Amino acid sequence: MVDLPDENQKRYIAVLSKKMDIGRTLNVLGHLSVGLSKQLSDDEGAYLDYVDLDGNIHPSLSHYPFIVLKADNSNKLRKVREEALNRGIKFTDFTSTMTDGGSTEQQLRTKETKEADLEYLGVCLFGDTEILREFTKKFSLYK
């Protein structure tokens, strides 16, 4: 067994708009998760392989908790993003400009939209639990 840090020391937190249907919600969460994991080193994310009794490997699962919360609207998500930027916390975000068409079309649509006009659908963060709680505790669990 690997000597691991306290699993409650850090965490992932995704805050998602409650205004999306389940298919869109899962798509947004997938994009956010993949994007954020690219920013983290293997050591930082503390990814683990699990091995079952038959010797099968269940690879690359996070040692840290992944909490999913819901937000009422885009402005609340924008504030989470701003806090992450101000505090130097690693994050990804997803807006409505990223939903239709291919990635080239989505990038162009995003580039043609002022930040103040973007509709945020989700933000995903990774960092110290206590710092993240300071500005995410007002959100409820996504159920």
Image: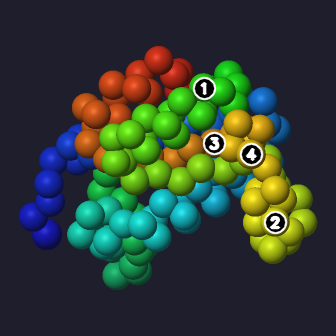
Q: Which mark is residue 114?
A: 4
Give the spatial CA distance, label 2 vs label 4.
Answer: 12 Å
User: Could you tell me which residue is drawn at 38 percent across and 40 percent down?
Assistant: 86
Left or right position of 36 against 11? right
Which is more N-terminal, label 4 or label 2?
2
User: Could you tell me which residue is drawn at 53 percent across and 21 percent down?
Assistant: 140
Which is more N-terminal, label 3 or label 4?
4
SS label for mark 4: loop
Q: Amino acid at mark 2?
A: Leu
Report the residue marked by disc 3.
122
Report the residue marked by disc 2.
108
Q: Amino acid at mark 1?
A: Lys
SS label for mark 3: strand
Q: Amino acid at mark 4?
A: Lys
Which is more N-terminal, label 4 or label 1?
1
Report the residue marked by disc 1.
76
Q: Amino acid at mark 3?
A: Gly
